Amino acid sequence: MKIKITSDSTCDLSPEQIARHNIGILPLTVTMAERNYLDGVDIKPTDIYDHVAQGGDLPTTSANNIGQYQEAFEGFLKEYDAVIHLNISSGFSSCYQNACLAAEEFENVYVINSLNLSTGHGLLVMKAAELAESGMEPAKIAEVLNETALRVDASFILDKLEYLKKGGRCSAAAALGANLLKLKPCIEVKDGKMGVGKKYRGAFEKCLREYITDRLANRDDLDLDRIFITHSGVSEEWLKIAQDTVRELQPFKEICITSAGCTVCSHCGPDTIGVLYIRK
């Protein structure tokens, strides 16, 4: 049985991972300076950073509508026996709702609410692709994915709060206080929504080590097959610190380094990095 795995562009997988598993990516729309772009197609995060640095407003992102999902599913079903589509969390976007409504027109389209974003979402896409390649039936794959979504652990640590302030998610006073105190907040995804976790204090390199240690140290409840280190544009030094710290704490079989896409970057800005993995 030929199964096509598809995903919203918010999964933030690398081009190599997408190509290796022949994953179909449906890009969200990014609106910037009154122009619409397709996430990852004709706009990239550095375009957003340059625009904001020059005084521009933060871009907005739009979900794919029902018709776009219907068209995509219909096209894939001309070549495949079934489609499994994974959405960004329904707590962040109407993508899941729209994809579910579109799927009602077909008997063999399965829509999964990832309850996550970025490579928290991407972890499920990779699992879906590997299960499909193993020969598992699509209904069973959907069942496994819905259960696994509850065990994804996704978080990021931010060096600066400028984008959160511009987006109204952090007051100017709070941002100023955080900068003065050198506070680096951890943003966590829980129950399909984002919230602020622990706040770290000091130089970012120190905070990064502490953040990863808090997430991984002395734990025996982790699926050690794969971990993502996903960032919105950080120095090679920070990436090395992150990789070395992960290796010191847990023997993951695969450490994947990926860059966040436009949807995530338009909310967090540059100099953000996170570790994302699945619990047992």
Image (tube, rainbow, N blue to C red):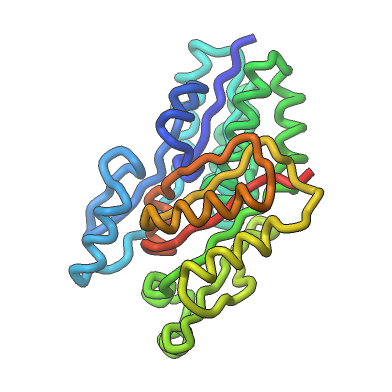
* Residue 129, placed above or below residue 78: below
Q: Could you tell me how many numbered marks the image carries?
A: 0
Residue found 73% across the figure and 17% down from its top: 137
Observer able to see residue 94: no
- Percent from the top left, x then y, of residue 245? 58, 55
Observer able to see residue 272: yes
Residue placed most toward the observer, 122 or 181: 181
Residue found 30% across the figure and 54% down from its top: 31
Can you say which quadrant of the picture contains the N terminus? top right
* Residue 73, placed above or below residue 65: above
* Residue 174, placed above or below residue 168: below
- Percent from the top left, x then y, of residue 26? 44, 35
Q: Quadrant of residue 41?
A: top left
In the image, taking residue 57 as reference, residue 255 lies left or right, namely right
Residue placed most toward the observer, 87 or 67: 87
- Percent from the top left, x then y, of residue 114? 63, 44
Q: Quadrant of residue 148?
A: top right
Residue found 63% across the figure and 17% down from its top: 133
In the image, taking residue 15 as reference, residue 134 lies left or right, namely right
* Residue 159, placed above or below residue 174: above
- Percent from the top left, x then y, of residue 52? 26, 66
Q: Quadrant of residue 235?
A: bottom left
Can you say which quadrant of the picture contains the C terminus? top right
